[in-house]
Every structure is written in structure tokens, then in C-alpha cells.
Image (spheres, rainbow, N blue to C red):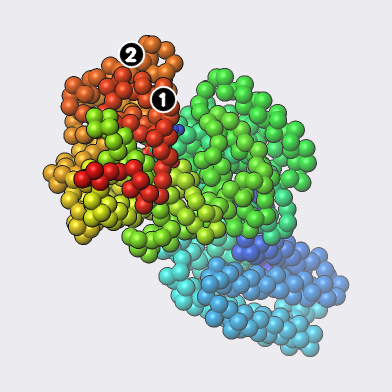
Amino acid sequence: MGATSGLYFDDYSPVGDILVVALCAVMIILLAASYVNKTKAFRLFITMIVLLFMGAITDLIYHDAYLRITNGNYTLIYVLRVFYHAFLFSLLFLFVLYVIELQRHVISVRVPVILLSSIIYLTVIGTDIITTINGTGFKLKADGTEISGINIFLVGYLAFVVLLVILMIVFRNRLFKRVMVGFYGTMAMSFLVLYNQGRHGQSSFTAATFLFPMFAMLYFIHSTPYDVELGAIDAKALNDMVRYNYDRKSQLIFMSLYLPDFDSEGKTIPAEMQAVIRRFASSFFNGGILFQINNGHVILMAKKIYNPDYENKVNKLINAFYDEYERFKYDYKIVVGESIDEISRKNEYVSFINNIHRNMEMNSIHMVEYDDVTQFNRYEYILEELGDIYRRHDLRDSRVLAYCQPVFNIKKQKYDTAEALMRLKLPETGLVFPDQFIPLAEEHGYIHVLTEIILQKTCDEIRHLLSEGYEVKRISINVSTLELRDESFIDDIERIIKESGIPDNKVAIEITESQSESDFLIMKKTINALKDRGIKFYLDDFGTGYSNMERIMEIPFDIIKFDRSLVIASDSNEKSEKMVESLADMFSKLDYSVLYEGVENASDEERCIRMSASYLQGYKYSRPVPIIELQNFFSKIDS
Ligand code: C2E
Ligand code: CA
Ligand code: CA
């Protein structure tokens, strides 16, 4: 190679550039096969690959031309040489832009650095063109011998390297440390190769050294690994896909599959089901991308333009799913829809879909409509208000209302207890019922503050009723199992009651059975501590969950609240009535009082009394009323 020319090009072999061309192609293949976030940095990166590819090819042609041109007309060689360097320097320039783009929040350095890079770039290329034309730079003699002349490239190259190193040092704490180490490591390899090729009088691998940091970029910044089994990628990438397509006004379609059985830490969708999802994701939609949101939740997104007949496809997919469902029978919720600008703009598909899940039946398919957006906005608004209530921590916050439902005491034939029930009253929505905010408050850790507010308002009213001479045995408040985990729970309850100046035993707490062993132990401890102060405890919603008698007995409850479902069941046939009656008898014999919830009519009432009731609660007596109206039900002590 190059034996004929004898001089300058003897130390060049095309292997380096051939390798660069091939590896650039490899990178492009890998990027096409993987999912990438099409950020600005990514577009810079792709441009850099193309520039390097072009640079290496130009270098190959340039050296080839050198060998072939023997007539002394070297113009083509000069031009190619300038182009080769222009490609590499453009690449260096983009390197700088890229580093800045990664740090885009540090705007202040942007302008001076870009200015400086532009000056270096223009100086190098300008000088090269001028010196080539006026003959003071690189020149080939008629016999093919080379005169290097003024070599501006080395200076320009060093200037860029220094600039990049300074930027890396300035931003050293901006990227995750291991990523930085990765970049430094690959750059060190570049210098090692440059040093060695210099030692051997070589120039074949110059372009190759540009590749190393690009591999680091590909590896650390632009690769989004698939879950190899499921074929899904991380949920984080969903936001990028939504933003990218929203910016380009490109409609997306989405299908969300939620399998609640697997939606908890440490669980995964079983392998066979994963295979089904993988197959569905790739065979029904063109260019569909599967995102793994949670262990039991995946969302498939695809561009609408690639799937114009998507409604058809959705139907096919759903039919195929039903066939599979026969085999697996896992509970599911499926949501299907097209992208909606309002949700795309805020990039909130996951919470949007989660909100739909809250309102839909298990094992059903929901087609998104505009109504869902209205619902979602309402949900977001409520959540915002809850957050505000939480942060203000004003125990007399006027947005939280205490309603009360009086409870009929059968033995005394009057109302002397009641249950406090929460409502929200928000400026934009009016009255909001518990099913629309309690689960939210629990999910976001706001529930305890709400309990404190209800307790405060209940204590205020108890004090008021007592001072007016009403006979109030107690009022119960509802407490969520989650709250008990809070270490300050006991103190908070005690403090609020104490500061209200009412006796502790005027307040009772309703709580439902806990599912987990650890919650059960916490509950036992908490209840025992508060019982010592005279606070009574109700087991709420008995008959709805998996009642574990052993556990129930271990906690000193005073009253068992039989859920309305038992009242309804007891009406269906004699056997059911006997069953409910036996349960109630058993509790009575064990010294618990039995309260029936949801007593709606005279027939319910009669049956409940027959079934060992001590207390009755339900619409038959009263709907929940604002707490100040409770005095209409309670009687004065002297009457
Ligand atoms: P719950 O504790 O079982 O409360 C009884 C629910 O049944 C109340 O619904 C009440 O209005 C309703 N109800 C009362 N009588 C009848 C009847 O005769 N028939 C029928 N069908 N329903 C009746 P509400 O007020 O909507 O509360 C729903 C749930 O929200 C409550 O169920 C409770 O779990 C929760 N909740 C309410 N207030 C609070 C609170 O302050 N804190 C907590 N943690 N949860 C609360
Ligand atoms: Ca209750
Ligand atoms: Ca209940």
C-alpha cells in the first residue's frame, strides 16, 4: 500500500477508516433496532455518526486519489483533504454542542462556548483553504512529494480537545459519576491510540479515535434497554415518546393492560403471559412500542399514521386476548384510546390511565372518551386541594366537612351515638364524597391530616353538644389502616382530644381489618395504647373482607359493625339469615355489641333486631347530615 509514492502516505493504511465506516453503520443498525428517546442530544449524536462516516469515507477516497493521480493535477486531492478535515472539525464542533446540550440547564456558558468553538472552527477551515490556495500550506510537488507547510489542524485539534476537557471538568459533577468515569475512560483510550500511532509514524486510526467517546454516548445516554423477555422498555421512555410526538403533532394510539395480581413489588407477569404480551405487541400494531409501567402494568403505544385501521386491529387484538384469557384467567383491566392533546401536553398518560382504572370494573375494556379527561381533571384538582390541605395543616380547614350519621341505640330506644363521615367542599366542585378522595388521600399520604381535621371538628361539636346539655355517649370517626403506621398517630389523637377539653371516652375509632401481618401487629399495639385512655374501637365493614376471627379476637374491639352486605344477604333466604344471626350471637356472647349498617327500611330493622342487634344505622333513621344538625337527633339529659 502506497509503495509507489514512497513518502508521506506510507504510514497510512485504510484499515482504520474501513473499520470506522463499518462501526458507524453498526451503531446506526443498533439504534434503529432499539428504542431511543429522540431528544435534541440524540439528533446531534446521529449527525455526529454521519459526519464521522463521511469523514472516514472522504479520507479513504483522498488517499486513494493520491495513489491514482499521477498527472500532477492535485486539485481533487486538495479539495478532498479540506473536506476530510472539515468533517472531523464539524464533528468536534458538535461534540461541544452535545456536551452543552446534556447540561442545558446551565445556560450561562452556552453562548461564550459556542462562540469560541465557532471561532476555532472557522479559523482552522479558513486558514486551510487560504493556505492551500496561496501555496503556504499543504502542497504536493510535481513528483508527488508532500510539503506539509503551515499545519493548522494540529493546533485546532488541540484547541478543541482542551475546550472539551475544560467542559468535562466544569461539568464533572453534573453527570452521574460512573457515567463520567465511562467517558474519561474511553477518552483515555483515544489518547492511547493516538499516542501509539504517533510513535509508529502512523495516521490510519485518527478517525477511529473519534469513535470511542461515541460508543460511550451510545451506551450511557442513547440506549434504552428492552426487558428481553417481555420486550418492554422502561416507563421513563414513555414520556419522551409522548413529548416527541406531541411536538410534531403526531397522533398516538395506546392500549394499556393492567394485571392487578402482579402489581406489587417482587412480582412479575408469568413467563407464558409475557410471551403472549410480547407476541401481541409485535404482531398487531406497526411500530408499536411496549412500555413497562409497573410489574403488572404495560402500555403499548404506536403512531396512528402507521396504523390507520387501528380500530380494526384493536378489535382483533381484543378477540385474541379473550382466547388467551380462557387459558390464564388473570384479572385484568384494559384501556384503549388515542392520544389527547390535553394529556399529552402534561405528559400524564400513566396517571390518566390509573385514574380510569379506579373507576372501571375488573375484567373489562374501556375505550377512552372525552369524559375521562373531565374526570381526570377533576381528580387532579381534588388531589391538588388535598395537597394544599395537607401542607397547611389547619385542623379547622373549612374545605373538610364533618357530616354525621346518627346511630339508633335499641336498648335505650334513642340516638346517643353517631358516626362522623367526611366530605370535601371545594370551590370548583362543590361537595365531594369519600369514594372520590379517600383512596387518593391514602395513596399520597394525605389521609392522616384529614383524620386529624375530622377529629378536631368532631371534638368541637361534642364539646358544644355537652355544653348545651345533650346526652352524647360518643361519636366515632373513621381511621385508615395506613395511618397507624405513622409513629405520631397515638400522640396526635390524644393531643387533639385533650386540647378540646372533652373526656377521652366521648370519641371512638372505626377501623377495618388489616390484610398484612405487620399492619395487624401495629394495629394491635395502637389500639391497646388508646384503649387505656378510654377510647372505644369499632371493627368496621365486618363481612366484606376475609374475616380472620383469630385476629379479630386478639384486638379488644367494643363494637362489631356488620356491613350492609350482610343486612342484604340476610334478606335473601332463611339460611343466610340464620348465618348472620349466628355470627351476631357469637359476638354478643363474647361481649361485643353488634351494629348493623345500611338499615334502609322497616323490614331491615325488624330483621336486624331479631339478629341480636344493639345498634342500628342507616337511611331508615337518617342520611349523614352536617355535624351541627346532630342536635336534632340527640336528647337533652334532663328530658
Ligand atoms: P363506612 O365507614 O362504611 O361508612 C358508611 C357509609 O355508608 C357512608 O358512606 C354512609 O353514607 C353510607 N350509608 C349509611 N347508611 C346507609 C344506608 O342505609 N344505605 C346505604 N346504601 N348506605 C348507607 P359515605 O359517607 O359515602 O362513606 C363511604 C366510606 O368512606 C365510609 O364507609 C368510609 O370507609 C369512608 N370514609 C368516610 N369518612 C371517612 C373518614 O373521615 N376517614 C376515613 N378514613 N374514611 C372515611
Ligand atoms: Ca365507618
Ligand atoms: Ca362500614
- Residue located beneath label 2 in the image: 578
- Residues under numbered marks 2 and 1 in contact, where contact means CB atoms less than 8 Å apart: no
For marks 2 and 1, the one nearer the N-term is 2
Residue 327 image point, x, y percent? 55, 19
Disc 1 packing (10 Å; few <14; some 14–19; many ≥20): few
**Element assignment for label 1:** helix
**Quadrant where the N terminus lies?**
bottom right
Q: At label 1, which amino acid type do we have? A: Ala
Q: Nearer the viewer, residue 175 or 269?
A: 269
Query: Residue 109, how many percent across, how many down?
Result: 54, 80
Marks 2 and 1, how far apart at CA: 19 Å
Which quadrant is the C terminus positioned in? top left
Judge from the rendering whether residue 106 lies leftward or rightward of residue 28; answer left or right.
left
Q: Is mark 1 within 8 Å of ligand 1?
A: no
Q: Residue at x 70, y 38 (%)?
A: 285
Camera-side residue: 317 or 36?
317
Name the residue rendered at 33%, 60% in the picture: 395
- Describe residue 516's horizontal placement relative to residue 179 as left or right: left
Residue corresponding to mark 1: 602
Of the two numbered discs 2 and 1 in the rendering, the one whose residue sits closer to the viewer: 1
- Residue at disc 2, secondary structure: helix
